[in-house]
Amino acid sequence: MAAEGGGKEMNEIKTQFTTREGVYKLLTHSEYSRPNRVPFNSQGSNPVKVSFVNVNDQSGNGDRICFNVGRELYFYIYKGVRKAADLSKPIDKRIYKGTQPTCHDFNHLTATAESVSLLVGFSAGQVQLIDPIKKETSKLFNEERNNFKRGSEFSKTRFTKLIIVRLIDKSRVTCVKWVPGSESLFLVSHASGNMYLYNVEHTCGTTAPHYQLLKQGENYSVHTCKSKSTRNPLLKWTVGEGALNEFAFSPDGKFLACVSQDGFLRVFNFDAVELHGTMKSYFGGLLCVCWSPDGKYIVAGGEDDLVTVWSFLDCRVIARGHGHKSWVSVVAFDHYTTSVEESDPMEFSGSDEDFQDPMIHFGRDRANSTQSRLSKRNSTDSRPVSVTYRFGSVGQDTQLCLWDLTEDILFPHLPLSRTRTHTNVMNATSPPAGATIITNTSSNTTNGNNSGANTPGINSLSTTLPRSNSLPHSAGSGGGIGSGIMDSAIATGVSKFATLSLHDRKERHHEKDHKRNHSMGHISSKSSDKLNLLTKTKTDPAKTLGTLLCPRMEDVPLLEPLICKKIAHERLTVLIFLEDCLVTACQEGFICTWARPGKVVSSF
């Protein structure tokens, strides 16, 4: 591993690495960056992000790449492992003043060779809809409005002051994504801890929106926009304490996983607006989240330097991975290496009509894809014969880690279906080179019956139980409140719930950037939330440790990375798995392509 060995070897930037599939090689000619290829001075800048889209070009080269570096946004033809990158011919380039791009997302449903819809979030809170092929700007959401304020009658002169205000949210956009299966709906999260649901076909209005409560639960609330005519935002979510750092939709688009600066992973039934389950980081904030291809597992990373694997069906932590030396900035599953062989097809425990009882549709059409449907059966029924989930992570330590999650971790009581040459039982503090997985011999995990609750309890483990995550767990699906509540709230603007007055949320102290090497995050006990009737319950980190929310380190298996390599000089901000390569990016503004084994084109 890159982390092992002497100082020179430890600091060497790797250009290739080997896994059981073969050798992954860095393609230096496929590197994308600013046209001058000069490293970007990243101090004070937002993370470099990358988005891909395929426009179904008949020429066979339909991949397009978008990335931001500082105030600049670039849109290129992505040639991947086939040809060298031509940085002299961007399809579109934009330079912004007074704000910086922070994130972006393509609408894959509407993309064609003549037009693409790209959402761009900004550090000042705006969201812009652009078409980089037509080089057009369609709409700006959460834009600034000019208000005129008169001076006080007690002042010496009566003056009129021009005040520029942002009506919906003043804080930085942390994540923006199109709602799966929709051509017009998109979701935006902010550093304020709020999320907003927009429709590109609706306007935002010229005055600050008024909200009314739709649903609230433990540390979250959802409000609708109260107005005579439908306007943006359609919904406002307030989730947790501090910044909402990232969110991700499940493969079937029915569930939403959110990670926040308060250290919590919260998983919601998106249509029913209900909390399905939660998890707490070992310490510090959670920064990134992703779903497994089948929707059964969620991986989160953050300021505890760990990757944490959470079971969607059991609502519990099933493993942690330790390999990074600093904050984990991105986690992602490799859909092309992950393999699952099941004894029988995965199905819902009831009919489709029983499960499809959503509260919200907003005109969204779902694709009935069996490939990504979530299983609602008890996890003890008909387990896979063989399963290997591959996921990766990159962090501020400039290292890339790849991890294998196998059935001996997922189903510890079942006999192994094949020989594990890399499974060892040993002390986690001194793993030898080549060890892949460290299991806890004292763990005696048992599967309990479904209790019907959606969220696991947070009471401390009983002293009579073994020191493992062995309490009965829940496999609730969320939902079941009734389909009429949301439709009534949106269609008529009149709800049975109390009307709330919205005040601007002040910036919280813990939203400020932590020092890069300071991994012991803190959770602020202060809140500037002014929403009346919203009940916030502070969670003491010391009380969650050792519970289902946050098991102790010795209570769950500890994974060691398959590989751990230093691949950049600056912190890594992107990890994307494609069919013939994987893509990484660092804060210097370099986007690198790593060819999978056997995918290097000889003409390079």
Image (tube, grey):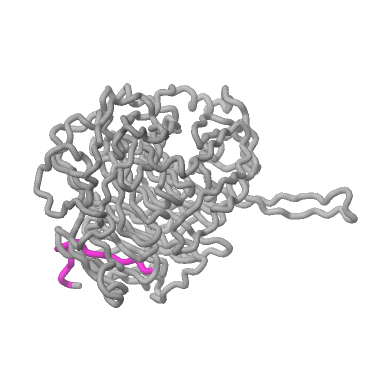
What stretch of residues is rendered in magenta?
Answer: 590-603
Q: Residue 491 at x, y = what percent?
A: 53, 27
Q: For this rendering, which residue is in front, 46 or 563?
A: 563
Q: For this rendering, which residue is in front, 307 or 428?
A: 428
Q: Picture quarter containing residue 382?
A: top left
Q: What residue sits 45% from the left and 51% below the top?
A: 284
Left or right: residue 23 versus residue 252 is left
Q: Residue 183 at x, y = what percent?
A: 40, 42
Q: Is residue 43 above or below residue 360?
A: below
Q: Quadrant of the N terminus?
A: bottom left
For residue 65, say whether it is visible: no
Q: Picture quarter containing residue 182?
A: top left
Q: What residue sits 32% from the left and 32% below the top?
A: 464
Q: Is residue 554 above or below residue 89?
A: above
Left or right: residue 157 versus residue 392 is right
Left or right: residue 405 versus residue 551 is left
Give the dominant element type of the magenta stretch: helix, strand or loop.
Answer: loop
For residue 248, say whether it is visible: yes
Q: Residue 445 at x, y = what percent?
A: 25, 36
Q: What residue sits 21% from the left and 31% below the top?
A: 380
Residue 598 among those drawn in magenta: yes
Q: Residue 10 at x, y = what percent?
A: 29, 72
Q: What residue sits 40% from the left and 48% below the top?
A: 282
Q: Is residue 114 above or below residue 536?
A: below
Residue 226 among those drawn in magenta: no
Q: Quadrant of the C terminus?
A: bottom left
Task: Give the number of marks.
Answer: 0
